[in-house]
Image (cartoon, rainbow, N blue to C red):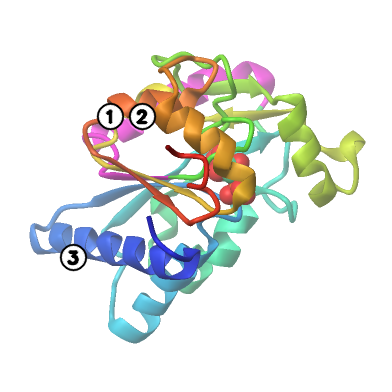
Amino acid sequence: FSKDPFSASKEIAKEIAELIRDKQAQNKPCVLGLATGNSPIELYSELVRLHKYEGLSFKNVISFNLDEYYPIQPDSEQSFYQFMNMYLFDHIDMLPENHHIPDGCLAKDAIDDYCTDYETKIEALCGIDLQILGIGANGHIGFNESGSREDSKTRWVALDDITIKEASPYFSGIEHTPKAAITLGVQKIMEAKRVILMAWGHKKAEIISAAIEGKVTKNVPPSYLQKHHNVTFVLDHASSAKLT
Ligand code: F6R
């Protein structure tokens, strides 16, 4: 457990930088699974700093974002597409063709094939090397809401009422908030070679305790991570307050 999100994020960025450089030395791509939301903002800002001032290149990085609202246009300011540009992609040297973010404006009947293809692309790269996760206070990872199976695939999902409510201030009201999303499934998250879940603040304390110390259940998808062989929960004092 780290004292504050700022120094914890720096440590995670350091690990990511080492992985990227390691892969560069082997002439291999580095496949990162990325999250949006408040939790990784400091991490992205540190990665940008490492790029600008410490020569870290992202040319060999291929990223797959966890999720995107549906429906949403990529140029909409609340889209995760804009989020990633604003906090990371606009400031580093990743090749745009190496960014993957689920498409929030597909025709409904194109979604299934699109999701299968998203997973095929990940598989073709031998899976995700390092997956960054946040956690919803209601227990989602990506937008795998409570009830998501451990073998769930990348798919269209209806969002939880709580998730919609929490997002609604950003969309100026519930009526303008998307009620669905496309999310990477739990299965691909579990297959990632390394998983780092970040959680800050007292609002996450209850779910962190359920995820780490509760039983493994589909009602709490992050509890599946108890079975992952290489996962770290990075927490601050507040989010770890309910652990025994
Ligand atoms: C976002 C995502 C979500 C968030 C979660 C926590 O891509 O996958 O699961 O990680 O909603 O959000 P924050 O970090 O804003 O508390």
Is residue 64 positioned above or below 179 on the image?
A: below
The amino acid pointed to by label 3 is: Arg
Q: Which of 24 and 206 is in front in this view?
A: 206
The amino acid pointed to by label 1 is: His
Q: Can I make out residue 80 in this image?
A: no
Q: Do the residues labelled 1 and 2 touch (CB within 8 Å)?
A: yes
- Residue 225 x/y as whole percent: 36, 29
User: Which residue does the image show at 76% across and 41% down from the upper left?
Assistant: 166
Looking at marks 1 and 3 on the same chain, the residue that comes earlier in the sequence is marked by 3
Dot 2: element: helix
67 left or right, relative to 128: right
39 left or right, relative to 20: right
The answer to whether the residue bearing label 1 lies less than 8 angstroms from the nearest atom of ligand 1 is no
Is residue 209 positioned above or below 16 on the image?
A: above
- Report if residue 109 lies within the magenta region: yes
228 left or right, relative to 202: left
User: Which residue does the image show at 71% across and 25% down from the upper left?
Assistant: 160
Residue occupied by mark 3:
21
The amino acid pointed to by label 2 is: Leu
